[in-house]
Image (cartoon, rainbow, N blue to C red):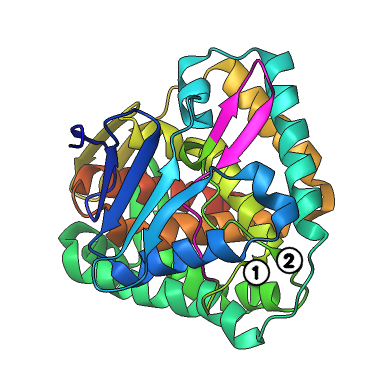
Amino acid sequence: METEPIRSRYFNRLTIGPDGRSVRKTSRRDKKLRDEISWYLNLPEELHTYIPGVLGYSLQDQVYLCLEYIQAPTLSELYMSGRLDQEGWAGVFARLDQLFGRFAAFPAELDPACLHEMYIGKTQTRMAAFLNGNERARRFYNQGYYRLNGTMVLCPFRIFESHLEDFRSLLDNPAIAVLHGDLCFSNVLYAPDKQAVKLVDPRGSFGIPGIYGDRRYDLAKIRHSLNGYEHIVHGRYSLQTAGNDIRLEIPFTDGQLRLLHDWDRYLGSRLRDVAKIEALLFLSMLPLHRESPERQMALYAVATRLLYEIFAD
C-alpha cells in the first residue's frame, strides 16, 4: 500500500512508499520519463554519488521509476526559507562547482542540430503554443510592445526574433559533457550538515535522448532559480495586469540578491551566454505553466527584463 501522492507537476505523479524509504514516479509523458530513467541507468558509475539509488523501473507499457527517498531539503526550500546564511550558500556553490567539474570529466560530441533544436527550435515551438493560448500575450506580440512597471518595452518574443543571430551564436562554442538538464533548485537535494548534493528529475535528453548536453544549460538553470523563478513558482510575487500594462514585484531579500551577484561572479566570462540561455528558458517554459495564467505572465515579464539586461546596448 502506498501513501498519498506528493506535490508534482500536473503531468507527473510522485508517491512515497509505505516504508518511507522509496519514491515512485509515473507520468502522462511516458517518453520523457523513459529518457529520465535512461539517464540514471547510463550515468557513469563515478557520478552515482550525486543521485539517489535506483530501486526499480519499467520502460515498458506502464513506465515507472522507483528511487531511494532522500531525507534532505531542496535548494528551493533552503533558498525561499532563508535557512542558509551566506557561508552556507558558499558551501552550496562550492559543491555545485565540484559537481560541474565531475560532469566535465566526461566530454562528448553533439550534433549541431541538437543545439539548434534546444536553443532555437524549441523556443519557436513553445512561443507559438503560448501565443495560441494566451490572448493578452498574443495582443502584445501583434502590436509589438507593452508597458512593464510603467516603462514601455518591446514584446519579448519580438526581441528574440530580432536578435536571432545573437542566439544562434550559442551554437558556435558549446561545452558538451554530462548534463542534468533541469538543474533548478527544486531538483537539487542538499543536506547542509553533510554538504551533500543529490540530483533528481534529470532531463534525459538534449535534442536527442542521452546523458550529454551543453554544460552552459545547467549553469543557466541555476541562474534562473536565482533570478525570480523560485519566487514565482512559490507564489511569492505581486502581479497586476490591465490593458497594455503589467506590474510585477518580486520581493528579493538582500541575501538573495547577493547570491545572484555571487553566481554571476562565478560565471565570469560565461555570463553573457548563460544569460541568453536563461532568457530562452523563461520564454520556452511559458506554455508549460498553463495551469496558472497569472504565473505565465509573471514569467513573461521576467523574460522581458532579462532580454533588456542582455541587449541593453
**Dot 1, how many residues are within 10 Å of its Cα: few (below 14), some (14-19), or many (20+)?**
many
Name the residue located 69 percent from the left edge and 24 percent from the top edge: 195
Residue assigned mark 1: 212
How many angstroms separate mark 2 from mark 1 (CA)? 5 Å
Name the residue located 51 percent from the left edge and 44 percent from the top edge: 184
Residue assigned mark 2: 177
In this orientation, which residue lies closer to the viewer: 311 or 251? 251
Query: Is residue 313 visible in this depiction of the protein?
Result: no
**Amino acid type, mark 2:** Ala
Name the residue located 77 percent from the left edge and 46 percent from the top edge: 267
N-term mark: 2 or 1: 2
Residue range in magenta is: 189-205
**Is 161 left or right of 248, judged from the image as shown?**
right
Question: In the image, is residue 237 part of the stretch drawn in magenta?
Answer: no
Location of the N terminus (image quadrant): top left
Question: In the image, is residue 194 part of the stretch drawn in magenta?
Answer: yes
Q: Quadrant of residue 3?
A: top left
Name the residue located 52 percent from the left edge and 70 percent from the top edge: 205
Q: Would you place residue 252 above or below residue 39 in this image?
A: above
Q: Position of residue 255 (x, y in %)?
A: 61, 17
Q: Position of residue 87 (x, y in %)?
A: 74, 15
